[in-house]
Amino acid sequence: MLRSTPVPRVCRVRRAAALLLAPALLLTACGGSGSGDDAGGRSSGGGYPRTVDNCGHEVTLKSAPRHAVSLNQGSTEILLSLGLQDRLAGTATWTDPVMKGLEKANAAVPRLADNAPSFEKVLDAEPDFVTASFVSVLGKGGVATREQFEKLGVPAYVSPTDCAAGKDNDSGGDGSRSEPLTLDTVYGEIRDLAHAFDVDERGEKLVADLKQRVTEATKGLDASGVSLMYWFANSQSPYLAGCCGAPGAITRAVGAENVFSGTHQEWPQINWETVADRDPDVIVLGDLTRKSQTAESAEAKIDFLEGNPATRNLTAVRKKRYILLSGQAMNPSIRTVEGIEQVAAGLREFGLAE
């Protein structure tokens, strides 16, 4: 949620070397307010500074960001969908090709790294705002902490999907959820970012479009009694979806069941013998292009499933009931809507849903 607040204005970060070696030089005089009009959005109208109440932190924006860095593909695709490519100084951490329709916009934005960039690399882009999809990216062991960015005068925002009520990021691995994630939290992130950049009308239009897509994809759909399993990556010790993250939102939308719905970890690593015991009707496969785990692509996953003695006799494998999703669709993001569309279409194609 965003609210206006009278706080001192600070200027954009200059050069990484100066930031690291001389913190006293961080706050320097800057020209221009950076809060002009945007077609399709609205004028700032004196609405800055603004403060974002975000994951227990107050994130102050002195003006509409003009040189933002997005540290995860999920937040990048929201910003591109809002038509803000000209306000992005860089992106990082990609699992998939950019969402269809955003190719041209994405090509105009520098990619700082395919995976996590160094803190210095981000500072070289001279950001005036930093966004991330995961708490871990702006925490210890990540790119840098919020506090490190904020000491340099750079506001840092984390997707509420990773710090919503019920999300415990200290429980190990990718964290756990005591409450199911809903798409309303994704819509909240869109509205936060749209308001931060002063393009609220674009945000409302994007939310309305996504809601309409969900309605159309699930209209008349009945997949009750159909069991699904979601496999993100890793063949030796696979990351499979628990009950309550983005795959849970997809499963609830189509009315099916997740074979690991009793597991509250976001992406628990579960052995193949346990998978064989659950014997899902359909396997949803992450089709990733990154190269940090084994069995990243859907092709590699299928080769493994059909060649492994523990999995080749699974119902879904024997009947080749595979649904391929991008990694971003399996993480909380605007592409979770894409995941709902693709899973709904796959279930209908297999004759498992009306």
Image (spheres, grey):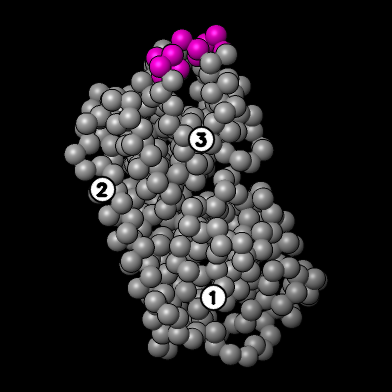
Number of the label disc, if any, that sits on residue 118: none
The range drawn in magenta is 308-319
Mark 3 or 2: in front is 2
Quarter of image, res 88: bottom right
- Whether 312 is drawn above or below 155: the answer is above
Disc 1: which residue = 65
In three-dimensional space, the C-alpha distance between marks 1 and 2, rounded to whole angstroms, equals: 35 Å
Q: Earlier in the sequence, mark 3 or mark 2?
A: 2
Which quarter of the figure is the C terminus placed in? top left
- Front-lying residue, 332 or 96: 96
Quarter of image, res 53: bottom left
Name the side, left or right, on which 194 lies relative to 98. left
- Whether 282 is drawn above or below 6: the answer is above
Q: Residues within 10 Å of mark 1 (few under 14, many from 20)?
A: many
The reply to whether residue 240 is in sight is: yes
Q: Residues within 10 Å of mark 3 (few under 14, many from 20)?
A: many
Disc 3: which residue = 286
Q: Amino acid at mark 1?
A: Pro
Counting from the top left corner in percent of width and height, residue 196 is at 45, 72
Q: Amino acid at mark 2?
A: Glu
Disc 2: which residue = 216
Disc 2 element: helix
Mark 3 or 1: in front is 3
Residue 303 belongs to the span the image colors magenta: no
Q: Amino acid at mark 3?
A: Gly
